[in-house]
Image: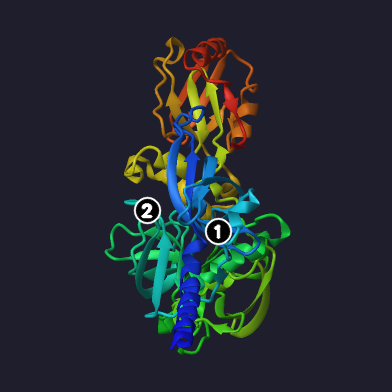
């Protein structure tokens, strides 16, 4: 009887150790962060404290969300049921996929901890448990739910990227971000966002995206998810299918537009080409594929390869099937239309008239309803860059962000949020253009032309004197910062 009790005790103890293992690898992350002021780019906000979660992975590293560690001045990590705080540093961050890897430098931090393993894409209707340190308490929190849906959705952190997500009814609250979603002892996701318009709906980043990120950083740098530069449209209309000499079988998505700047895509593909297959997956007339029991947008296949790699496409063109080997690359030209992190915004002040890059960050800083407060031609420059020509897609429009009042500019008749198109007769497509245009012109005036059609001028001598006075008055360190700089 005693032997039997001892055996039962050993079995129970072994089970308890295994059961405790996942939460022992889950950590709380405290980030002391300072963000810039995008309307007055020479200023920064006060340092604020934010909290999130993370978990230990192979190589004595901690995985978390990019938004948990963004704009950091100092990062501290707390182990499970341990009061001690350990300093940590960012190793890699992928803002496009909202993932980051950080590392605690003290090797004692990892003693007794077992790294969590990354699993596979979970099945819909299966159970999942989320671990993390959400607001409302100091201890680790567990919530259980089921996998509700798997599909491509916008990643809120970067704003202009959509990748694969998993939806669950398990509670994912502020502070849960970066924590693991587990099935058994395997990580099937990283908690990262919710949706204020939905009840009992949280989202996590699936293993497909996690593994892509980890593979990307194997060479010591992070490149990012590539983009093919194509826009597809549904191809249900029988008449249109017949016009393209396609059978009426609901197979094939039409390339509606080739975006910019993707020169290799423009070389190999044409508008009205029909994509029949990608990497052997049949593409439906709704641009969807069958993938591991889910009907998902074909874009997940383009997201599965690394920057510079190629995909096999079977397309339909002029009544014939063609095989295309399409290389895909990361797109940095649309940087300003997404949220930017960890680089200070550029600016230039001329006689108290402050200019900066038109960007999603600048617009968002003006309030939640900023879309209603801009002219449509300004929004087009920001949100529809990929639909312009290559030069337009590469340009970084300059906007009047602030007027620092001074007698020399008291009657300057152009409002903020206006795009500058010319200075002293020179076209302006970037901050570098703006700096160079200061020396252009052969008279005593700086002459400004705006997208709205408005024109204005300042005396050069007055502007120079005003700058000197205003920099001193407002404690601005310098009159310009042309290129975005790492903080």
Q: Which mark is residue 63?
A: 1
The relative height of residue 259 versus residue 243 in the rendered view (above or below) is above
Residue 308 visible in image? yes
User: Which quadrant of the rendered structure holds the C terminus?
Assistant: top right
User: Circles 1 and 2: CB distance less than 8 Å?
Assistant: no
Residue 464, quarter of the rendered image:
top right
- Percent of width and height locating residue 265: 64, 65
User: Which quadrant of the rendered structure holds the N terminus?
Assistant: bottom left
The relative height of residue 194 versus residue 434 in the rendered view (above or below) is below
Report the coloring of the rendering: rainbow
Which badge, 1 or 2, is on the more N-terminal residue? 1
- Percent of width and height locating residue 470: 49, 14
Q: Is 321 left or right of 71, judged from the image as shown?
A: right
Residue 159 visible in image? no
Local crowd size for mark 2, using a 10 Å CA cut-off: few (<14), some (14–19), many (≥20): some
- Percent of width and height locating residue 290: 48, 83
**Residue shown at the point (40%, 42%) measured from the top left:** 364
- Percent of width and height locating residue 447: 53, 22
The secondary element bearing badge 2 is classed as loop
The CA distance from mark 1 to mark 2 is 17 Å
Q: Which residue position is annotated with label 2?
A: 174
Q: Is 371 left or right of 68, judged from the image as shown?
A: left
């Amino acid at each position: 009887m005693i032997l039997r009790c001892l055996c039962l005790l050993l079995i129970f103890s072994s089970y308890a150790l295994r059961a405790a293992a996942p939460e022992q690898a889950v950590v709380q992350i405290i980030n002391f962060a300072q963000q810039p002021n995008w309307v007055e780019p020479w200023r920064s906000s006060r340092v604020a404290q934010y909290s999130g979660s993370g978990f230990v992975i192979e190589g004595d590293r901690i995985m978390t969300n990019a938004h948990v560690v963004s704009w950091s001045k100092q990062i501290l990590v707390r182990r499970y049921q341990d009061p001690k705080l350990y300093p940590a540093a960012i190793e890699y961050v992928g803002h496009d996929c909202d993932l980051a890897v950080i590392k605690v430098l003290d090797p004692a931090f990892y003693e007794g901890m077992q790294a969590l393993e990354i699993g596979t894409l979970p099945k819909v209707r299966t159970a999942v448990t989320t671990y993390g340190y959400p607001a409302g308490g100091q201890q680790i929190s567990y919530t259980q739910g089921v996998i509700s849906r798997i599909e491509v959705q916008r990643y809120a952190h970067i704003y202009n990227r959509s990748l694969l997500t998993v939806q669950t009814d398990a509670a994912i609250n502020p502070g849960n971000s970066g924590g693991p979603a587990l099935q058994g002892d395997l990580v099937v996701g990283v908690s990262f966002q919710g949706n204020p318009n939905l009840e009992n709906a949280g989202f996590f980043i699936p293993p497909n995206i996690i593994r892509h990120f980890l593979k990307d950083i194997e060479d010591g740098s992070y490149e990012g998810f590539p983009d093919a530069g194509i826009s597809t449209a549904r191809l249900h209309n029988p008449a249109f299918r017949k016009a393209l000499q396609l059978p009426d079988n609901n197979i094939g998505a039409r390339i509606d537009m080739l975006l910019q700047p993707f020169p290799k895509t423009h070389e190999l593909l044409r508008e009205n080409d029909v994509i029949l297959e990608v990497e052997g997956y049949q593409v439906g007339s709704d641009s969807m594929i069958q993938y591991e029991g889910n009907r998902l947008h074909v874009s997940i296949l383009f997201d599965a390869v690394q920057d510079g790699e190629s995909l096999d496409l079977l397309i339909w063109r002029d009544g014939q099937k063609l095989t295309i080997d399409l290389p895909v690359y990361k797109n940095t030209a649309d940087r300003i239309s997404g949220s930017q992190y960890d680089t200070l915004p550029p600016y230039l002040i001329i006689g108290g008239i402050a200019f900066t890059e038109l960007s999603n960050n600048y617009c968002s800083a003006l309030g939640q309803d900023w879309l209603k407060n801009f002219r449509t031609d300004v929004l087009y420059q920001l949100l529809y860059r990929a639909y312009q020509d290559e030069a337009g897609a590469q340009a970084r429009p300059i906007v009047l962000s602030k007027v620092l009042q001074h007698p020399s500019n008291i009657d300057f008749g152009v409002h903020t949020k206006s795009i500058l198109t010319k200075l002293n007769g020179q076209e302006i497509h970037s901050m570098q253009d703006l700096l160079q245009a200061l020396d252009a012109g052969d008279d005593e005036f700086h002459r400004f032309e705006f997208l709205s059609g408005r024109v204005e001028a300042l005396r050069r001598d007055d502007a120079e004197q005003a700058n000197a006075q205003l920099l001193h008055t407002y404690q601005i360190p310098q009159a310009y910062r042309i290129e975005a700089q790492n903080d």
